[in-house]
């Protein structure tokens, strides 16, 4: 992804809004591109709270402050696997038309204007909320996997330490027996 935006980055045309502590910590060291963070979202992760952020982003886009908005997040597959995803949030990309499909005129209810004003902003909010939920689930999955591995490693460490302790104990007992036998031999002799 870095290659895709290298030219814009060199020209100073890349801005980052971080949602989450790790992203904020990383990009805060780059004040030229870092516009802020919303780490508080994960404390109260609801559609309404995510919508507030999305509305700010849509407003900035509508004012012409950005010509493209892209979200980068970890897509949750399972507790051990997360995929980095890059999706264009704004402007909305039209669906891909195949050669076999013909363009069809639809009669829309409600009107096109109402759809644009109501449904499209809601769809954008859902897309960002989905990305945040995926990232949150990925974080928990990664923590769960890390804790499981740490537990397994601790079990192995305990096993190794118990074996070392028993060997040392056995060596100490053998030493004491040898000293007793040597003492008994010395008394006989």
Image (cartoon, grey):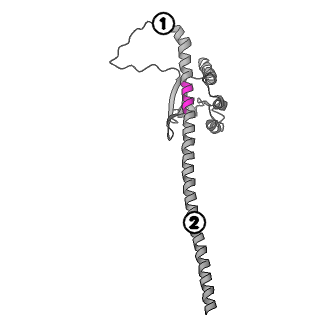
Tell me the quarter of the image containing the C terminus. bottom right
The residue at the point 59 percent across, 84 percent down is: 181
Is residue 30 or residue 13 the one in the foreground?
Answer: 30
**Residue 13 percent location from the top left of the image:** 59, 29
Q: Which residues are magenta?
A: 127-134
Q: How many marks?
A: 2
The residue at the point 58 percent across, 73 percent down is: 171
State whether residue 69 appears in this view.
no
The local crowd at label 1, few if under 14, some if 14 to 19, many if 20 or more residues have their Cα within 10 Å, is: few
Labels 1 and 2: the sequence-earlier one:
1
Tag nearer the camera, 1 or 2: 2
Asked if residue 157 is among those painted magenta in the image, a careful observer would answer: no
> Is 112 drawn above or below residue 11 in the view shown?
above
**Residue 49 percent location from the top left of the image:** 64, 24
**Residue 8 percent location from the top left of the image:** 55, 30
Q: Quadrant of residue 64?
A: top right
Question: Do the numbered discs 1 and 2 sit on residues whose CB atoms are within 8 Å?
Answer: no
State whether residue 42 appears in this view.
yes
Q: Quadrant of residue 60?
A: top right
> Is 152 drawn above or below residue 55 in the view shown?
below
In whole angstroms, how far apart are the C-alphas of marks 1 and 2?
A: 77 Å
Circle 2 sits on which residue?
Answer: 164
As helix, strand or loop, the secondary structure at mark 2 comes to helix
Per the rendering, the mark at residue 65 is none
The local crowd at label 2, few if under 14, some if 14 to 19, many if 20 or more residues have their Cα within 10 Å, is: few
View extreme (left): residue: 100
View extreme (bottom): residue: 189
Circle 1 sits on which residue?
Answer: 109
**Residue 56 percent location from the top left of the image:** 63, 21
As helix, strand or loop, the secondary structure at mark 1 comes to loop
Is 43 left, or right, of 1 in this rendering? right
Is residue 178 or residue 52 the one in the foreground?
Answer: 178
């Amino acid at each position: 992804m870095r290659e895709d935006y290298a030219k814009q980055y060199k020209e100073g045309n890349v801005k980052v809004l971080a949602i989450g502590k790790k992203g904020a910590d990383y990009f805060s060291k780059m004040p030229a591109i870092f516009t802020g963070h919303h780490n508080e979202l994960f404390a109260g992760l609801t559609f309404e709270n995510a919508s507030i952020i999305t509305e700010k982003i849509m407003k900035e886009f509508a004012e012409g402050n950005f010509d493209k908005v892209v979200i980068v997040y970890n897509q949750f597959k399972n507790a051990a696997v997360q995929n980095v995803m890059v999706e264009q949030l704004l402007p909305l990309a039209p669906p891909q038309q195949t050669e076999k499909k013909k363009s069809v005129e639809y009669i829309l209810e409600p009107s096109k204007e109402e759809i644009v004003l109501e449904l499209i902003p809601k769809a954008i909010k859902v897309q960002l909320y989905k990305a945040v939920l995926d990232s949150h689930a990925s974080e928990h999955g990664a923590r769960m996997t890390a804790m499981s591995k740490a537990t397994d490693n601790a079990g192995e460490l305990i096993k190794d330490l118990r074996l070392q302790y028993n060997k040392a104990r056995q060596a100490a007992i053998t030493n004491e027996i040898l000293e007793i036998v040597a003492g008994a031999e010395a008394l006989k002799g």
